[in-house]
Image: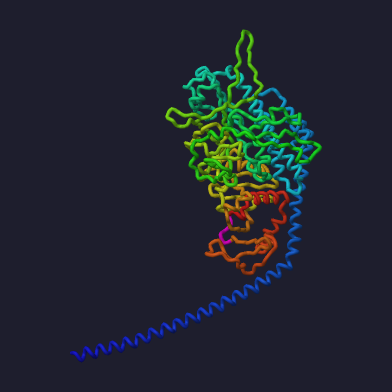
Amino acid sequence: MLTFVFFSLTANMKFIGKNGKSKKGKAARLRAEALLRAQQEEEARLERERLYRELVERLEAKYEVEKESELAQYNSLAQKFLSAKQWKMDYREQAKWEHYLSCDGAPDPTVPQEINTFMSLWRDEQDQDVQLVMEKGEVVLHLIEKLQFLLLETAPEDITDEKQEQYLQVILQLQDLLHQKYNDATQSLLKIASMYEDSESGNMHTVLKDINVTFCLWANLKMKVRYKDHVFQEAGHAFELPMSLALSSVAVRVLYTRYDHVSPLWVQCQGLPRQEGPATLESAEQPQDTGQGSGEEEEEEGSEEPSVPAAEKTGSKGRKKSSASLKETSNNKDDIKETQEETEKNSENLEEPSQEEEAPLQEEAGGGEEAPRVVDLEQLVPVGGVFHISVLRLPPQAQDVGDWIMVELLDVGLEEYPYSPGKAEDGTQEAVQITLRLPDNVIYFEVPVLARWDPAGQWWRTDGISKITYEAEEKRITFSMGGFSTVALLQDAHLNLPYQAWELHPTGVDEGFFTVTAAFATIQIQIKDNQCMLSSVVVEEKEVLSHITGKWMSPVALRAALKRAGVNIFPAEHSPKYVPVPRKVSEHLTAGSAKGSHWSLLMFDGEKVQHLKLTETSEAFSEEVQEESEFHSTLYHMVKEFASSEAMEKVERAGCMFIDSVYQLLLATRVLAYS
């Protein structure tokens, strides 16, 4: 038995020994095979790289040979843009001639003598009825829009700096004059407020509306505490005054304007020249709201320009107006006198806690116990117009004396009430509570940021506003402030970027559909010749913005209409800081969506275009060129390489105005870069 066990163990040991030698040999063999494979793969990789380098060198050489001819061919195709440019110049000249023949009384805002005469005559008019100001305001807004569109549509090389400055000055002066007229009309109405007192409260209130403006005015004639709050039923706006104001002879005005004449011009209309610094038009000449300050203004030195009365020297929202009218015989910018706002309004009194919004803000330079929260206008932009909220000194009222009505006239114009918030009964600081009904024709995709205009700093800021309640379904916002300010709702300019998808496909001769699927909305635009039409805007499977759909307009006008409505799909020059994206192109011959296999990825490095081998689903980026592809000097020639002859014939037959319209939309949306 012992012998058997010994024999068995010995046999087993022999078996193990043989097995160990076998495993070591196999491992060595596997290592050798792996090493051989690695060497072969490395050799193959080096060979592929060598062949690819040779291919690139051949493509580079061919590209250098063909570059000049491609550029020459492209320049010949670019003649269509020159034709479109000439057509638009002829159209504008024809429009000027037809306007001259119409003799409708409206000025040509590009002609200094005409626009100066228009402003001078309106400035001197004594009829200060609010309704008449609204009617004249429509004409003024049309003139401003005409100049804005002219600046946007005119190539930089086709307009001199002097002309550009002239148009900007006209825009600013028209904006200031319009707001001044609303101030004059407010003052006239307040002088006779007692004639329209409410039978129940004894106070006066009125609401006037048109498509551009909602004018709400309340006068505290009886000065009773129980009437410290008021709702403008026709407008949906409301306020509640602190005790000190409820017992004062004051008036409250809520002036809503669908337009924004407060922000810098480059914010009001994207694409206009951006001028910054304290001496620029935007910072020195923004309209002043009469409700923001302490009621005291520093007088300007005497002006040498007699055509502008003293009442016009102070602008309408925190800026002092340039006293120079447009010079018909001089293009020197130095002839235009600019002054800077020197008196800070009661923004120091606005000490309410800041709103808890995660908004892109900047800190104001300079010392101070609490730096104001300044809005970054490159990332947040006002949407839905501006609300000018003012507390005003009530002027002496008309008195019945026998058969006469006597009114004490004070030559001071519309006065702000010098209000400083005191302490409430509970020891906290007094605050004004405001409720605003938001416009129906504007979309806020996210909770908007509420900001107030600081006339001293010439910026929007979010401090001084607290207890914000936003009701999206009711389109209403309620908040508290330590004083009275001009306020606006701001929205992220890039919230719809990057685009989820986009398509451009033909629907007929010189007709097409341009569809952009953004983060929150799908926008479909029909293009025909030199015009565009918003076909639909779909948000959460529901069509919206019916007030601007189905209307033909220029690409520039369409862009302005969409931005006013809160649908901003137009990146600005600073947008690459926020939205990095790839580029892609696909051919469309017929209406409908392109198939998944038809998409291509192209890369342009500033000198040449190449068709990349990788796809959107590739794990890593590579500049490897697609097989049977070449380098080209333009995107047109790159697409031509793999496009069908039918597609290129359609491109070559397209009319110059249709091409220009497509070009403007693509340039405005930059879908190649932001998808």
User: What segment is highlighted magenta in the picture?
Assistant: 593-597
- Which one is in front, 299 or 503? 299
Rendered image quadrant of residue 75 = bottom right
Q: Which residue lies at the image location 61% right of the left edge and 37% below the top edge?
A: 456
Query: Eyeballing the image, is 14 above or below 352?
Result: below
How many marks the image carries: the answer is 0
Residue 386 location, x and y as percent? 59, 35
Majority secondary structure in the magenta region:
loop
Query: Eyeballing the image, is 394 above or below 319?
Result: above
- Which one is in front, 504 or 377? 377
68 horizontally vs 542: left or right: right
- Which one is in front, 191 or 592? 191
Q: Is residue 576 magenta?
A: no
Q: Which residue lies at the image location 50% right of the left edge and 45% below the top edge?
A: 358
Residue 465 location, x and y as percent? 51, 36
Residue 297 location, x and y as percent? 63, 29
